[in-house]
Image (cartoon, grey):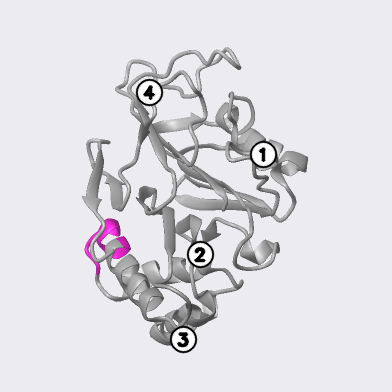
Amino acid sequence: MCRLYGIRSTHYTKIHCELLSVQNSLIGQAEEDSRGYPNPHGWGIGMYRDGKTICRRQEDPAHKSEKYRETSMDTHAETAIAHIRRATVGEPRLENTHPFCTDNSFLAHNGHVDHFEVVGEDIREFLPEQRCDAIEGSTDSEHFFQLVLHEYEDRGADTMHQALQRATKRLRQWVRAAPGEGEGGLGLNILWVYDGQLAGSRLDRTLWMRCRDTDPICPICDQHHADVGDEPYRFIEFASERLTMDDNWEPVPDYSVFWIDDEFEVQFEPMLGV
């Protein structure tokens, strides 16, 4: 069911140790996560740097990819998302690999949309032609990306978290109405970046967060990860699994959407209509 990692920071910050070297690094989770599952069906890292989106993806397993290691070492940004995939909907191909990107936005998903063979048709019928044409793969995740962009860019949602609320509520209605056994489940952990801002959701999957106001010398690489000087610093990270067992990770509230405000505080709102 994939694993996620994302950051938002006041300063450009390196995250290579989190991706490669810490106790429960993302590369280690690619080989085997805390549930005992591998996540071998591709990896992707998106970052917002110098006013533009940079997105690098590969269908190879992260723990067997030299490109993953190179990209991790090169990830130096104020906002970034990393994803390792365990395929459920859509074959392990490059076009199905997260994060899904546009010129100014990228999104990664951990979860599952039940009855997607029907719900995917509902999404495509709802979206305008240009949004459907932008879908290159066959995942529920990429369909949701275009749905949330449609709510934000085309249908006038005022904020990213409002767009997430609208898209999630609409998706839930389609899942519940789809024919099939039972009511239909929805797992929707989202990390979404738009013009450098980060928002997301937690629904029925684990998601942790940690905040800090300093950039200490890293005990792994023996270096600072950011060039802060005397300026105030704030670093916020999100992860499907706690990357270390000895730090102050807190669970993101389940059934919530969240965003980071102008003061670099994480704000939460109950997920509506779910």
> Which tag, 1 or 4, sits closer to the chain's start?
1
Q: Is residue 97 left or right of residue 6?
A: right
x and y percent of residue 183 in the render? 39, 72
Disc sitting over residue 248 in the figure:
4
**Tag 3: Cα neighbours inside 10 Å, few (<14), some, or many (≥20)?**
few
Q: Is residue 224 left or right of residue 215?
A: right
- Tag 1 secondary structure: loop
**Residue in the image at 62% along x and 59% along y:** 97
Q: Which residue is identified by label 3?
A: 129
Q: Point out the image quarter for the C terminus.
A: bottom left
Q: Main secondary structure of the magenta part?
A: helix
Above or below: residue 228 compared with residue 96: above
Disc sitting over residue 32 in the figure:
1
Q: CA distance from mark 2 to mark 1?
A: 22 Å
Q: CA distance from mark 1 to mark 4?
A: 23 Å
The picture quadrant where one finds residue 154 is: bottom left
Above or below: residue 63 compared with residue 274: above
Query: Pointer 1 and pointer 4: residues touching (CB < 8 Å)?
Result: no
Give the label, 2 or 1, closer to the camera: 1
**Residue in the image at 44% along x and 14% along y:** 216
x and y percent of residue 204 in the render? 40, 53
Residue type at mark 3? Answer: Glu
Q: CA distance from mark 3 to mark 1?
A: 40 Å
Q: Is residue 153 visible?
A: no
Q: Which residue is identified by label 2?
A: 141
Q: Is residue 149 visible?
A: yes
Which span is picked out in magenta? 157-164
Query: Number of numbered discs present?
Result: 4
Residue type at mark 1? Answer: Glu
